[in-house]
Amino acid sequence: MELLKISAVSYLNTYPFVYGLLQSGFLNNFRLDLDVPSICAAKLAKGESDIALMPVGAIPDLTKYEIISGYCIGAVSKVKTVLLLSQKPLQEIREIWLDNDSRTSVQLARILARDYWRINPVWKNLHPGLNHEENSMESIVAIGDKTFSLKKKYRYIYDLAEEWMKFSSLPFVFAAWLTKNQLPESTLNSLNQALEFGVMHINETLEFFKDKLPEGEDCYSYLNENISYTFDEKKKKGMKLFLDLLQK
């Protein structure tokens, strides 16, 4: 088989998957690219990747796809790194800046504002070059490793996975493993074995990536307690509800 092109998210929550792909030995002859979620989505959509850890909010853009793994990036309580940060309580928020590294998180914030929080803020896009640390931003949806330091600058922190659970009583899925191609069963089995290996070796993952870990954070607790990797039936129901609400 020719070189298999894989695109995965570059954040801490994906490190176990990356470790499994790189170190388990189950999958061979592949190239792994690490990108922000929006780029993962674009690469799969354009055919630049064979497999991608696809942001769920970008799935409706695909005319053809297959979910190929029993693993995902999900949350069953606080996720800790997908946040609405604000200087004001929810009901006083008038504008929200949006981190467009992940459309899924932006869409989730919009759904919660409309259907759960019942607020109608002005939404502003945080274009490339604008600083997440800008103190004049009243409220911002922020994702990924940057939230570890960014949250210290805001008075109010709303965890979007936790808010979704309050709203829906279901887990949230941020990203799932997808392909647009017909891949050999042996390749899919090897992929899933590699992902499982990583999830089962969190300590080794953290040691492998020790130079990239955010300082002062309990990364072991984050990966074990805040990120839920198994793509089970409840997560599938949560994902379906989210995609249904997007159609509104």
Image (tube, rainbow, N blue to C red):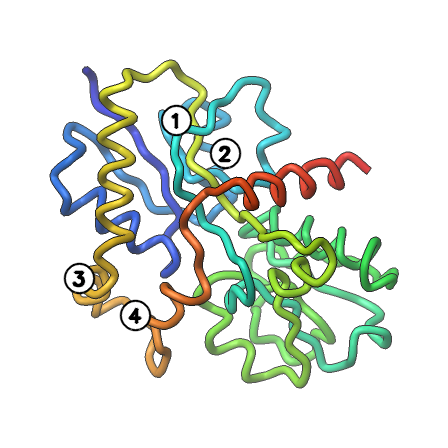
Label 3 crowd (10 A; few <14 / some 14-19 / many >=20)? some
Q: Are marks 1 and 2 in contact (CB under 8 Å)?
A: yes
3 or 1: tag closer to the N-terminus: 1
Name which residue lies at 40% across and 17% down: 181
Label 2 crowd (10 A; few <14 / some 14-19 / many >=20)? some
* Residue at the disc numbered 1: 48
Name which residue lies at 54% across and 84% down: 152
Looking at the picture, how far across and down is residue 101, in whole percent? 54, 52
4 or 3: tag closer to the N-terminus: 3
* Residue at the disc numbered 4: 213
Which amino acid, mark 3? Answer: Glu
* Residue at the disc numbered 3: 204
Q: CA distance from mark 1 to mark 2?
A: 8 Å
4 or 1: tag closer to the N-terminus: 1
1 or 2: tag closer to the N-terminus: 2
Which amino acid, mark 4? Answer: Leu
Label 4 crowd (10 A; few <14 / some 14-19 / many >=20)? some
Q: Are marks 4 and 1 in contact (CB under 8 Å)?
A: no
4 or 2: tag closer to the N-terminus: 2
Q: Quadrant of the C terminus?
A: top right
Q: Secondary structure at mark 3?
A: helix
Label for residue 11? none
